[in-house]
Image (tube, rainbow, N blue to C red):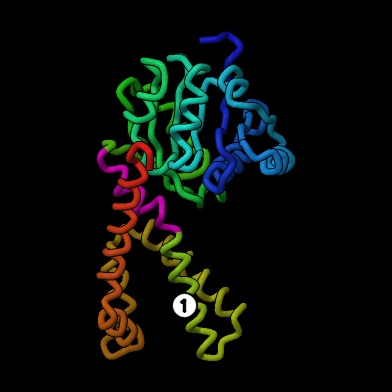
Amino acid sequence: MSAGRRGLAVIGGGRIGEALLAGLVRRSGAGDVVVCERSAERAAELADRYGVELADLEGAAARARVLLLAVKPQDADAVLGSLAPSVDPGHLVVSVAAGVTTARIEAALPAGVPVVRAMPNTPALVEEGMSVLSAGAHATDEHLDEAEELLAAVGEVRRVPEPQQDAVTALSGSGPAYFFYLVEAMVDAGAALGVPRELAADLVVQTALGAAVMMRDSGQEPEALRAAVSSPGGTTVAAIAELDRHEVRAAMAAAVAAAHARSVELGAPGS
């Protein structure tokens, strides 16, 4: 490993790349972080916003030991092909490209390069992310520890066998969008009943936050918490009956299954 190589390079400045960059800089500062982003305009925006230095792929690999691959899955093969000549087993590649397997990344890089596959989500932007890690063939427990420490700066971290990663992507990777969708629908419903939209948004967002904290901290199952709000013959029972009539539970299962299937598709070479 090069004696001058240290720190982190964020390769890709999209939404998830920025979410991770923002949380990491807020937690540890920008001193050892470089960003590699192919759009000059976007790169300048990130440099100005977070005070990080910019580099091309070769420069990023020369300066940073940990390479955080945050590109779109469709761009992964091209980026890895360009990065490969500058990477060696002294690096650690942490990939957050949805669906892209560690085997696919390893095949594109020199032999022996350790790879950790991760699936974070956008609440990393406010240090409330959920990230899940899986080790590639050359990644040791020490590499997993390092990746976990990196992502713990922006939220919670769990480890799973890699075959579970597509399901994790469907649950927590895409999961924030499901909640945003539900909140959007609730705000629309409140506005339709005459509640001012800004007030409806305040009510629903705080309700969502409080419900999430209750699920996290109470030690009770969601079913028990829901039952505690559902007085016989009351308003909540009427609402849940309507959700069941519209098969909302089945719709959610189908939505997660669709996200899982798409994650599998994105992981296929050439996708």
Is residue 22 shown left or right of residue 135? right
Q: Residue at x 31, y 66 (%)?
A: 252
Q: Looking at the image, which residue is at 52% across and 69% down? A: 205
142 or 263, which lies in front?
263
- Position of residue 16 relative to residue 206, above or below, is above
Q: Is residue 169 above or below residue 250?
A: above
Q: Position of residue 52 (x, y in %)?
A: 69, 33
Q: Where is residue 58, by image quadrant? A: top right
Say above or below: 205 vs 41: below
Expressed as whole percent of the image width and height from the top left, the position of residue 203 reads 53, 76
Q: Amino acid at mark 1?
A: Met
Disc 1 packing (10 Å; few <14; some 14–19; many ≥20): some
- Relative placement, left or right, of 101 versus 184 is left
Q: Which residue is mark 1?
A: 186
Q: Which residues are magenta?
A: 163-176
Q: Which secondary structure is most common in the magenta stretch?
A: helix
Element type at mark 1: helix
Q: Toward which corner of the image does residue 44 lie, by quadrant?
A: top right
Quadrant location of the C terminus in the rendered image: top left
Whether 5 is among the magenta residues is no
Left or right of 94? Residue 10 is right
**Residue drawn at (36%, 24%), measured in percent from left and top?**
106
Q: How many numbered tags mark residues here?
A: 1
